[in-house]
Amino acid sequence: MNAVTTGLAERIGGWFSKPSESVVAAEQAALRSDRFRLEREADWKRLDAILKRMEAGRTRALSDEDLLALPALYRTAASSLSIARETSLDAALVAYLEALTQRAWFLVYGPRASLWSWFRSFLGGGWSASVRGMALEIWIALALMVAGTVVGWLLVEANPDWYYALVPGGPGEVRVPGASREVLLRTLFGNQDQNGMSVFAASLFSNNAQVSILCFALGFAFGLPTMLLLIHNTALLGALLWLYHGQGLLLDLVGWLSIHGTTELFAILLAGASGIHVGRSMAFPGNLPVMDAAAAAGRRAAQVMTGVVLMLVIAALLEGFARQMVDSTPSRLIVGVFMLVLWCGYFFAFRRGAR
């Protein structure tokens, strides 16, 4: 056998006798993972046993030693998870530690209050305190809504064609400029069982719900889109008021709207104020960094918006049931004024709770 043949045979034999570098690396990684697990597994198992008892509602059965050790065991597991990720240990170990630390975090640092206790605290002063904390923005939003109503009235009074741009409608719509008193009167009374009025009322509710959400969501743009939305939405109201005023039915329309409108428009007012509150905090953060000021304003505004959703649900119930049962203007006005006084009393007279 010549030298070339001998060298080739030795090389081929070396391939089969020595493991590849990838195999060696995998074996070393597995060895590190096993060693890592053995050094810390006792603490993980103890933490897991404590968590299982607490999750099963048997916290009282735990010893004082276990309760005192729980925070330290959680920090140990979190540290182990960080090391496992940085050193690229096996995926199963990382997944186990992620699940363990998530469970431990919830029990160590998670919220202690139940949903019912939170809701009771929310209605018992938290919501109203957050609303009072945006008093300036509420006045700004109210001024914009009044201005929008006046603008809508003046636009259609100057040119009735503006009505079609402001008020949503469709084929067969009878609430249009030039409609007779009798036609408009039939849209307000004696038609609780007719689908046309229900569809129109539902479209108004849908529109107002969308406006409420957008008013808050667009507040990050320094509140400017929120202000424009408030003006545009209430311009629709001004156009409707102008139309019915032309036939001497202004008070009747106000009564028809007030059953659910005092609640629904109040919700839009608060949503607009929430958006302006966030935008103002970003434009004028004071001594805080912009992001910190926006975060603080966002937390307050989010609590108010949670209540806005509740108000919209109540408005929908009033629209769906109270409207069907009440068919006279004085009675409608009584319901609407009662709801307005109720909301004002709750928000501005009910002083329990901190901001």
Image (tube, helix red, strand yellow):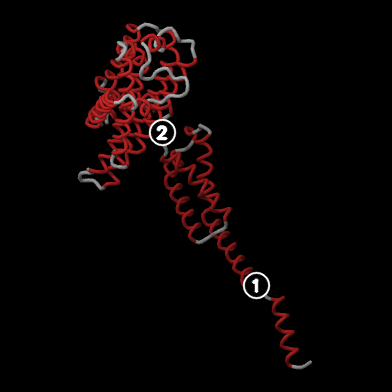
Q: Quadrant of residue 302?
A: top left
Question: Relative to the observer, which residue lies in front, 147 or 11?
Answer: 147
The disc, 2 or 1, on the residue closer to the chain's N-terminal end is 1
In this rendering, position of residue 195 left or right of residue 28: left
Q: Is residue 267 visible?
A: no
Give coordinates of residue 298: x percent, y percent: 32, 38
10 Å crowding of disc 1: few (<14), some (14-19), many (20+): few
10 Å crowding of disc 2: few (<14), some (14-19), many (20+): few
> Vertically, is 310 above or below 293?
above
Amino acid type, label 1: Ser
In this rendering, position of residue 73 left or right of residue 274: right
Q: Which residue is mark 2?
A: 112
Give coordinates of residue 16: x percent, y percent: 72, 75
Quadrant containing the N terminus is bottom right
Question: Relative to the observer, which residue lies in front, 178 or 218?
Answer: 178
> Vertically, is 231 above or below 287?
above
Q: Which residue is mark 1?
A: 20
Extreme residue toward the left, this view: 287
Q: Residue at x 33, y 37 (%)?
A: 299
